[in-house]
Amino acid sequence: MNCKFKSKILLYFFLLLLVVLAGCKESEQPSQNEDSLGSEGDTLRVAISGEAEKLDPHFASPVNEVAIVQTIFNGLVKFPSGTVDFSKIEGDLAQDWEHNEDATKWTFFLKEGVQWQKGYGELTSSDVKKSFERVMDEETGSPWKNDYNNIASIETPDDYTVEFNLTQPDTSFLLKVINYHGGMIVNTEAIKDAGDSFMTSPVGTGPFIFEEYNSNEKVVLVKNEDYFKGEPRLNNIEFMIMTDTTAIEIAMDQGEIHLAPGINDQLWVDKRNQNNDLTIDYTNPPLLWGIYLNTSKAPLDDIKVRKAIAHAIDIEPLIEEISAKEAASVPEGPVTTGYFGAANVGSYEYDVEKTKDLLKEAGYEDGLTLPTQYISTLSSYLDKMVFVQDQLKKAGIDMPLEQVDHSTYHANARDDLNNIVMYGYVRAPHANVTLSQFFYGPATVGTPTAVTNYSHYDKVDDLIEQGSVEVDEKKAIEIYKKAQEQIKEDYVFVPLVELKTVLIRRNEVNLGYNNNDIDGTMIYYYNIDENTEITK
Amino acid sequence: MIKYTIRRILWTIPTIFLAVTAIFFVLRILPSDPASSILGENATPDALRALKEEMGLDKPVSVQYVEFLEGVIRLDFGNSLSSGRSISTEIISLLPYTLELALASVLIATIIGVPIGIYAAIKRGAFVDSIFRVSALIGLSMPAFFLGILMMLAFSLKIPLFPSMGAGEGFVGNLYHLALPALTLGLIESGIVMRITRSSMLDELNKDYVRTARAKGVPRRTVNLKHILRNSLIPVVTVIGLNITTLISGAVLTETVFSRPGLGKLAVGAIETRDYPVLQACLVLFCLLVIFVNLVVDLSYSYLNPKIRP
């Protein structure tokens, strides 16, 4: 019996193994036709650090997803690839545009002959209208809906003209129609056809066409031969889902991966620099990290306490030691350096003695204990908040922290539960966007029109409103500068550090734009366009 | 025997029920709101409310629980929250990857572990025996992700024999990509197999029938390989079967390190995105797998050894 038993077991193992392997082979077959050996050299392999399940640009939110959708879709306008500069915005689907005197009506003239992928015909103005109306529709549930609250109506006088009528004047309206988030033009017909699987069936007008989604492994795109800006140089792009950073490093050294996210850490940078086949990039706009002080709650409603906190934090170590040297810099004010209208108003000077005097004046001679603050367990948030906690402690201010899950942290901050909110972000690169989200009365958290005004600050509302209707760029810059100076004087935001995004690529990749250099990107990742190629 | 089998099978029902209930409630206790982690930081309150309704999270927990149980019975776990795809389809498409990894590593573990175990038992107390025992201990204590990275550095980067990532295409590509991950898991597993083979061989070596066989002049080789090995393989088979849990946790880590698709990676991804239905389905599946394997081992054990049958 033993002999029988043993051989049976072995036999079952082999049979099962074979069946399983055969099963796998079957599921792989559809992609086999595409990858003929000859085209192997022109496949760009890109590492993404997690699942990319929402490939509908009106929902895509993490870097993984946005990096993919930006190669499939277009906006009306765009930044030149590899840069982020408001004054250099160029046409994408639109060849030209104009606005009326008070910037309440924006007209875009579309390029003719732009074809949808997968046989959905030519792009017309009504497609553009439907795409924006989709984002604006409550039913759709897009997280970018509020970006378009200012649009009163969209009209299409002919097939190649789109007119946006705005409720309020908006001189930075172009940023709402760039190829980013809600500004990407989707084909509502294709979305309807895809039914329940619309999230993973993207159809756009861009240089690459969605081909295959291998859950947990990769997303495959193939070139769009009929792309309106010319045939792309790459044949395929494979976005490989790789969660292990060491695995990414090995795959890059081997040449199996061409583009990958980097790590903002000097040790990592030094180690990777030893490999001459690789280039490390530091991209703008930086994330602006800082703490927002809630002026509606004691004890922070007292400006002396806010001042005490601002002067107690020495940001040097944060810049010198905590991140990669080339990626970190001193913030210049409440608006990220490089944004249109950002003024260099400087950060607060470090002066513990001043803090102690201020605390004494405010009646906290024996030291101050702040209420418990929630903080995210995500290390990028937690590390910085613990750093602030440590600095405050040296100046006699205790700030107890309670760690909560990242989404709970953001939910709590929006429910106005924190006195001090740590936040780091990138926004569309225009002072008006930052100011109207973080320092504008109606954007106060806990109100129906809330955005991210964690400070309950409303002292520059007039200036923000003036700025958004000022058509003259120079005058607008002056107005924004005044607002930023006022914000600094009122001590509602303590800027800590500006961190560029670290990316890494193999040298055989020619990005194909901006002299093969990526200075800026809105997607925290490499832009890939029709000119990107792999050189031998 | 039939009575015992039926009773044993019936006993799995309450076990499954308890396990599934525990999974449901443990996931509900977890902090964080799935709706806000899906929609991200910029979600509007209205969109959040709409998504919660769609996900059924606005219903009372008792109602959610009953719906969940119904789903488990029908093996229908609903749709993924983040991608909207059917979870059952997803699992069916990923199951082969994890199974082939698990089976291939068991095979490798057996091929490496059994012969070394036999050799170590025969040479008990000798220098080679100690070497093998220490190596097995190192293998057992080595985390899968660490060995995986070592294997990648050695056989993918320094000596470029195998690819370090992906699942490959076609039958040959599949096996080629399977090599390193399976070797990693197999080596770790072979430590256990080797130790069990060795100790059960040693048990048998001192039995009377062995002495008798030797006394009547049967060649040593025949005694070792025919008489002893056959009898000592029963515990080995049991241990391999029961080790399914090690294999699953090993597969989770190995799939991550080697960027392979599979159930482990699905579960890890679901944790990151707070995709409750997917996570629930993965956990239920792992639970069912462990319960099933335990059942099979129990039944085959009592079939082979009537003494333990009540």
Image: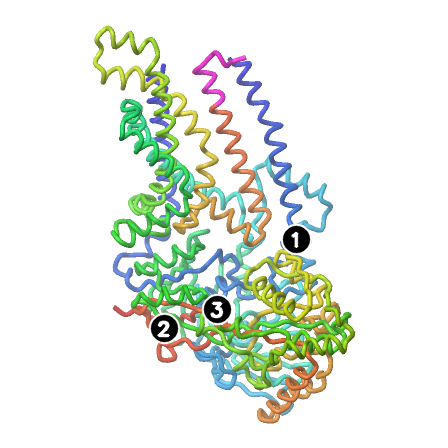
Front residue of B39/B272: it is B272
Q: Nearer the viewer, mark 2 or mark 3?
A: 3
Residue position for label 2 = A511
Helix, strand or loop: magenta stretch? helix
Front residue of B226/A333: it is A333
Residue B301 lies in the magenta stretch? yes
How far apart are the alpha carbons under marks 2 and 1?
42 Å
Looking at the rendered structure, the kind of residue marked 3 is Ser
Kindly state the secondary structure of the residue where label 2 is placed: loop
In which quarter of the view is residue A393 placed? bottom right
Name the chain letter of the residue that bears numbered label 2. Answer: A
Say yes or no: labels 2 and 3 on the same chain.
yes
Q: Are marks 2 and 3 in contact (CB under 8 Å)?
A: no
Residue A74 at least partly seen: no
Name the chain letter of the residue that bears numbered label 1. Answer: B
- Residue that appears at 47% across and 74% down: A521
Which residues lie in the magenta part?
Answer: B298-310
Residue position for label 1 = B54
Kindly state the secondary structure of the residue where label 3 is placed: loop
